[in-house]
Image: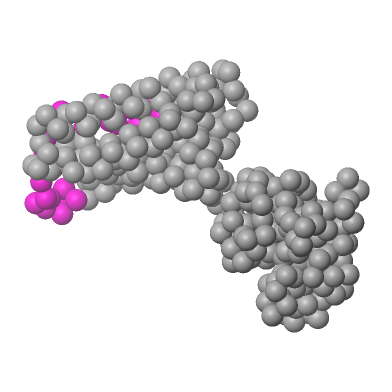
Amino acid sequence: MLNALGVAQIPLLAAMLVGGCSAKFARAVQRRSIDAGLGPTALFPLRLRPWAAGTLCAVEFGLGIGLIVTAGTLGAGAPAMVVRLGTCVLFVVATCALIELRSIRPDIGCGCFGEFSSTPITARTLLRSSLLALAALGTVNLAPIHPPQSFSDVAATLIFLLAELAIFGLLSPEVRDVLVRIGYSEPCELRVQSPEQTLATLQRTNQWRRSATLIAADQPLDVWRELCWRYLAFPSKYNGREAEMVFAVYLQTRRPIVLFALVDAATGVVIPWPVSSARPVGWRWARLLRRGAHASPQPAFPSWLGDEPGQGRLRNPNQI
């Protein structure tokens, strides 16, 4: 029984480490910031946070893969001992860091699983980290794992694994947040999305690539939001005139609608597109929305675009 309990810790710890690293990496790619959403990095000076976050993610991934590789006879001995001791030390240090983080920044989450760990640190979070440290400690002297010889060995390991997963599920606020996200879709007016995330989403679209030659800077001059739309104005120049390339990005996670127009910087009048044979993709979307091409409800058309190209006027952001 004790051997089955020890064997169950290897896949559990490996799943926690690799899963946590994957969630952090996905958040970093989405936000284009390696330290985005990683709670323990708040303990480091601002300039060291990207290095600390990258190191933490790499260590978690390396230990998670190492636990799997050294579980059998291939990595038995000193390599297995080093990986398991390293895992134990990691969770002990993580527990201490969470205690410190809770005392100085009680408003932020632990960042254990990226954007899913935004809930402030509680006693349950600390208990979960402590139990993971004990689980890692229990694997230090574990003998090399061999294929099970009987059904009873498999059943005992599965029972222990499922029981521990249930315990960690009860101690994890992330489970509740995931279930809420699955069953609830918040109105777009209340949807929280940072300007950095909107910019990263915009720069992956065809509309951005199509108008890239007219954009003079990677960072916008102005960013503002109106209900379900976020507007980004970039400096541009056309026929010697100061202009702005204005994008309207619908706030949704996947495949957002993106409208764009070239606007005179002084008057706010929409300038006809430079290439007459290539009308901006945004105008095609605009006409579809105005004509009600789809039966399903569509997002409201941005108020700063006119009925026809060249007749729109950019609304003063201060009036929104």
Q: Is residue 221 above or below residue 51?
A: below
Dividing the picture into quadrants, the one containing residue 204 is: bottom right
The x and y percentages for residue 194 are 66, 45
Q: Is residue 104 left or right of residue 163?
A: right
The residue sitting at 52% across, 40% down in the picture is 33
Dividing the picture into quadrants, the one containing residue 59 is: top left
- Position of the N terminus, as image quadrant, is top left
Task: Give 254 or 287, whichever is nearer the viewer.
Answer: 287
The x and y percentages for residue 258 are 68, 64
Q: Is residue 64 left or right of residue 183?
A: left
Task: Give 245 or 223, whichever is nearer the viewer.
Answer: 245
Q: Which residues are magenta?
A: 129-154
The x and y percentages for residue 209 are 59, 63
Q: Can see residue 275?
A: yes
Task: Specify the farthest residue to the front.
Answer: 240
Q: Is residue 203 above or below residue 259?
A: above
